[in-house]
Image (cartoon, rainbow, N blue to C red):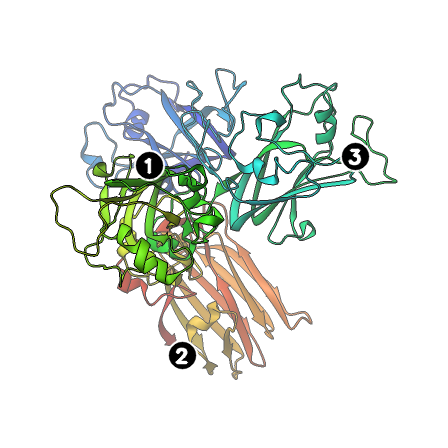
Amino acid sequence: MSYKSATDVMWMVDLEDIYSIYQVVIYHKTGGVSFADSTYASRFLGFSIYISNTTEKEDGILCYRDTHHIASTIPANVTALCFMVGRYVIYYNTREGQAVRKLDYSALTQINLCEVVVNGCPLGFHGKDCSKPCPVNCHHCGLISGQCDGLCSPGFAGPTCDQYKRINLALHRRTYQMSTRITEYPSDKLVDGKVLTRHISQGACTSTLDEKIVAMWIVDLKKPRRIERINVFSRTDNLTWDKSNDFTKKLLGFSIIVSNTTDRRDGVVCYQDTQYTASTIPDKVEIFCSVIGRFVFYYNERLPGIHYPKDYSKYAYGDLCEIEVSGCPVAEFGYENADCTIPCLAMCHEYLENLSYRKPTWQSYTYAEFGSSDKAVDGRKSRHYRDGQCTITSQSASNTWWVNLEKKYRIAFITLYLRTDNSTFYFRSIFAKYYLGFAVYVSNTTNRNDGVLCYKDRSYSTRTLPDRVTIRCLQTAQYVIYYNERRRGVVYDSDYSHNVFGDLCEVEVYGCPSPVAEVPECSKPCPSNCETCYPNTGFCTKCKPGFEGSACDVVCDAIGRAGIANDGFYNGSFTDMFTSEGHTFLPTEHGFARLFLTLSGKSSNVAKLSFTIHKASNVFVAFVNSTNEYTVMHFDQYTKTQHWEVNVINEFMSKVHLIRITVQFKIPFTISNLRLPLRACFRNDSDISEMAWRRPGMFKYVREIH
């Protein structure tokens, strides 16, 4: 029961953990008489139920609000279906505004609850008796449907969190392996994307030499990446996978290590097998490892003098068929999203990569196999055809070459390396005329007419055409298409050849390796409460203390006004108290300094006060509520410590409207690192210019009181 109120009343229960809730049952006091048309019924009318993860109903979700009952129809026991997730269940009623004028509503409201029952399941379970687990990689799911209605684990998406959307960061990257047995099966077979082929004869696996005490394989991801999952596919040679298969014994005991150098000892051990036997180890081992790194190691050993379990092979081997390293290409951004989406293209300018490297290609009129279309994306840039690093095509009236980036990317620029046979003279006199008039398209199909023309040569001659051409092309596409033609009936410049070919020695397509959203914030200036803003975007990478969010508009420390009463003098400005340097008070005759911090609105929901004090005698702190009552009083007495931490915890659910700090001192003392964290952050809707005065301390100094 509560006091009667002409404004509002609130009751809450702390479930002490976050639960999946489906039902809240309210049992109201009846007084042993008929509830219909009673005083209790009129006080019950208009109540609401909120589910929240904080003690603030505004931070939660409205589960139920009584809007259709009158005193004769409202039941004493109300069941509200609330398919929500939260820790606090809040009962609320009000008689402010127009509520008191509604039919049968009492003039005053009051809490008269006899019982509140909250039914639900622990997070991760569903079903009538909470016995069914939610889908793997789902934080919480619908209690009836079992479908994921909460966050999936990083990288997963879909109703049952079974769609893994991260890309394979290791695909076609440079690799190294110790003691390769057969040169035809080099280390890069483990990053060719062929996970379904597990037999050595099919050319998708590696094999290492016998009688080696160490086996090691490395993939270079080129840059530090945000890694989340690593899959290791063992070689099986299509034999039954059990303890009779020697590959099970060779796999046992392996480790996966992630490092930023080529020395595994500098890295982090993501996984080390210590639990499997030849009968239990799977042929594909899935490893979840949240780490940022550039080099991924597969490592196994059979060192002399060490006794290994009986199932282990005598020597160490690296007989594998694929290693997938999944995660986000840009370590700093996008990992909150399953697709690793980056908000702004500007955030990716420093992370542009060659997206065409070793991707699928096609060309018309290949002259010979040594000049196949994939030579233009092999990462090698010799410009002579004899080195086997250029595409070679036959002369024809038109020529097309394309690369499939395998997904849509935001492209920045494209660089073409043309054939020269390592001679400027040959390039000008023989080859240049065949390239004149070329065009570059980007498209989401292999048809250039479905796409966008990025560039068309209309100005070069054989004397001015560069042998390396860079084309700016800010488009989103999956295919990049090189095209040239000599159409009948068209009169071309005298420098142009009669036919064309498409001999390309390399085509590099630079773009953002992650999807780009280009949200509206990208064109905004840096927020006023931001210390570091990413270039050319409105996204903050480091907010001032007390603020959070990409726009630093989420307030997590109290905002208020302050005054200082002091009989003497002090150095510095008031806001220095919120910095590590601090605010220094000078000695006075009376030896006291008093500070007043005034809070209102959501800033009154203070969790605690903390600060560091240096060389003071005694400290007294008082929290005062809206009715000018002391709710918390704290006293710290000087010992022999030069400085100490003052921490004052607020009472549960208590709001603070005034904080009084009184310090007794004889010599100059300093207050620093003053903080007032809130129980719940809130988004500040005030004008940015009004927020500009806030800095570390988010308190506006009003006046001195002498």
Q: Give the residue type at disc 3.
A: Tyr
* Label ID, residue 365: 1
User: Does the rendering let one see residue 80?
Assistant: yes
Residue at point 61%, 35% (across, down): 184
Give whichever of 464, 140 is nearer the camera.
464
Which corner quadrant holds the N terminus? top left
Q: Earlier in the sequence, mark 1 or mark 3?
A: 3
Q: Who's the residue at 48% across and 17% down the image?
A: 127
Judge from the rendering whether residue 94 lies leftward or rightward of residue 316; answer left or right: left
Which image quadrant is residue 254 in? Answer: top right
For disc 2, the marked residue is 706
Residue occupying image coordinates x 35% and y 48%: 343
Residue 112: percent from the left, percent from the top? 39, 30
User: The residue under label 1 is which amino acid type?
Assistant: Tyr
Quadrant where the C terminus is found in the figure: bottom left
Q: Marks 2 and 3: which is nearer the front?
A: 3
Q: Is residue 623 above or below residue 36?
A: below
Q: Nearer the viewer, mark 1 or mark 3?
A: 1
* Residue position marked by numbered label 3 in the rendering: 315
Q: CA distance from mark 2 to mark 1?
A: 92 Å
Which one is earlier in the sequence, the residue at label 2 or at label 3?
3
